[in-house]
Image: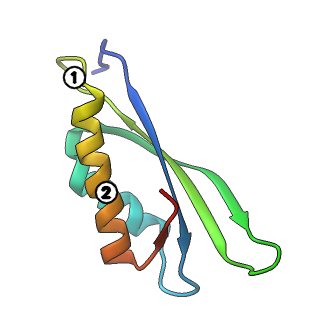
Amino acid sequence: PLSKYPPLVNDISFWIPKEGYEKNDFYDLVRNIGGDLVEKVSLIDHFTHPKTEKVSHCYRITYRHMERTLTQEEVRTIHQAIEEMTVEKMGVEGRF
């Protein structure tokens, strides 16, 4: 079923470690924290710094509830938890 309520979209970007990072692990982490409120996770930018050769990923996370309109405050709480756990569990350096 499709929701008739509008989505809320937030982006998250971070420097990934040279080893041990898997995109699918990030997708799983987002879905574990956001649950059914996460409609979609998309990699929207991949950047390599020309001098340091550090790699950055930017993901767009779309949140939507099936039965009501979400508030930005509700989504901010979930998104902040995703940011914190991504740094803690995946060893990335946040750009937020």
51 relative position to 18: left or right: right
22 relative position to 78: left or right: right
Foreground mark, 1 or 2, reads 2
Q: Residue at x 82, y 73 (%)?
A: 50
Disc 2 crowd, CA 10 A, few/some/many (<14, 14-19, 20+):
many
92 relative position to 89: left or right: right
- Whether 77 is drawn above or below 33: the answer is above
Q: Residue at x 21, y 46 (%)?
A: 35
Q: Residue at x 30, y 52 (%)?
A: 80
Considering the image in quadrants, where does the N terminus appear?
top left
Q: Position of residue 82 (x, y in %)?
A: 31, 57
Mark 2 highlights which residue?
A: 82
Disc 1 crowd, CA 10 A, few/some/many (<14, 14-19, 20+):
some
60 relative position to 80: left or right: right
- Whether 1 is drawn above or below 87: the answer is above
Which quadrant of the structure image shows residue 89? bottom left
Mark 1 highlights which residue?
A: 66
Query: Quick one: which residue is furthest to the top in this view?
Result: 4
Q: Position of residue 36 (x, y in %)?
A: 22, 39
